[in-house]
Amino acid sequence: MTAVVTDPVAALSRLVAGHADDWDRAGRLPTRVARELGAAGVLCAQVPARHGGPGWDAVADGRLTAQAGELCSSTRSLMTSQGMVAWAVTRWGEDRHQARFLPPLTGGSLAGVAFSEEDAGSDLSGVRTEITHEAGRVRVTGRKVWVTGAVYADLVLVLGRYAGGTALVLVPTDAPGVTVLPRPDPVGCRAAGHADVVLDDVLLDEIHLLPGAGAPFGLPAQSVLLAGRISVAWGCLGIIRACLRSTARHAATRRQSGVRLAEHQLVARRLGEMVAAEQAVLRVCEHAAAAWRDGSPDLPAAALVAKHEGATRAAGTASSAMQVLASAAARDGHPVARAYRDAKLMEIIEGSTEICQLELADAAVREWT
Ligand SMILES: Cc1cc2nc3c(=O)[nH]c(=O)nc-3n(C[C@H](O)[C@H](O)[C@H](O)COP(=O)(O)OP(=O)(O)OC[C@H]3O[C@@H](n4cnc5c(N)ncnc54)[C@H](O)[C@@H]3O)c2cc1C
């Protein structure tokens, strides 16, 4: 397998720029585009060249993710999911898992993360999906909800109970016993292909079970969630940039009461806060990505801070942008209206704002007393 020769930045621009609002209204993006993004190395840019990926480090991948977040949060959602699956295989897989599962992920196959269940959202220790392993075969039974990208996915990474602990298993969506049930009309990221995934006595070869099976909840699954948090934080930076661009342009040109909006101090204050949000989120994202790249012990806290700041500031910035654009953005199909809906979801996924705050409070008690 040789390294991809395409430029992921150029591929992202070519395939996505200018389409997000149409895809959002349609509630779907073309599967062909998602596969081309994957084959161009956009969806999991950290996969090493020996497995067909661009082999970028976490900081470069983060900048690409911010670019995707600025263009289209649905596309960024697919990047986050595929990146999490690729990271699980890279971090926890042996050579045989990496050789089997990574080249397809950089060759146009698509993947999602199936952790949440109806009664296990914020608290994933409550998952009920059963994974068993006997005579070289793995059996999976359960029901997963809200799996981003599942409508397009060839593979889902499933978290389940296993031998007194938990395990991660890679389940092809065309395996007998797998049913994908699309979730219609999500409030945001409408083209990200959310679906529930029913796993009815799915039988797979044991290579689909990742090493680390049986570990208490908190090891493989937590490391995958960390990767997701950093990716979502970069995506939030992209949302902030999209809102800042639209708001600055509008405030610089529209006139009310005889002056440009930007000259009204109450509007100017919002613009100033947006610039500060963009800079603050950029810095925490860079810090978290560098911690990931360098294997720093700061990684869990840095990822939490980046996710928390990214999501809350993206939601605040998008709300401010709506206020400044007012009726100009008050319709479906406007980038700021889309950002407003997408940003709210960022406060819910990959550790809600409250869950991040609780974990940061734990860190405060550990480190500041
Ligand atoms: C658009 C979208 C995409 C998603 N994509 C995926 C995906 O790809 N894969 C996947 O596995 N899951 C996915 N999810 C599920 C997502 O991870 C969960 O929605 C999220 O973890 C929150 O769980 P919940 O919705 O069940 O809310 P709940 O856990 O029921 O929480 C409800 C509210 O209570 C708060 N709360 C919960 N526990 C506490 C506590 N201990 N203290 C204080 N407050 C608390 C929460 O912050 C939240 O505000 C997605 C969800 C959405 C909406």
Image: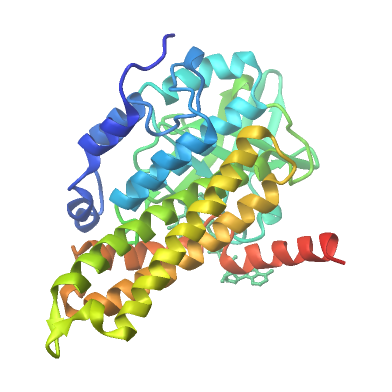
Q: Nearer the viewer, residue 85 or 356?
A: 356
Residue 330 lies in quadrant: bottom left
Of the 4 image quadrants, the one containing the C terminus is bottom right
Q: Which of 140 and 95 is in front in this view?
A: 95
Relative to 361, 252 lies left or right: left
Identify which residue is drawn at 51% across, 38% down: 59
Identify which residue is drawn at 24% across, 81% down: 263
Relative to 325, 79 lies left or right: right
Of the 4 image quadrants, the one containing the N terminus is top left
Q: Nearer the viewer, residue 72 or 150?
A: 72
Identify which residue is drawn at 38% across, 72% down: 272
**Identity of the residue furthest to the top in this view:** 1
Identify which residue is drawn at 73% across, 32% down: 213
Could one spot residue 111 in this view of the protein?
Answer: yes
Vertically, is 218 above or below 139?
A: below
Q: How many labels does the image show?
A: 0
Relative to 211, 252 lies left or right: left
**Identity of the residue furthest to the bottom in this view:** 257
Relative to 251, 313 lies left or right: right
Counting from the top left corner in percent of width and height, residue 276 is at 45, 65
Counting from the top left corner in percent of width and height, residue 128 is at 66, 51
Counting from the top left corner in percent of width and height, residue 313 is at 47, 66
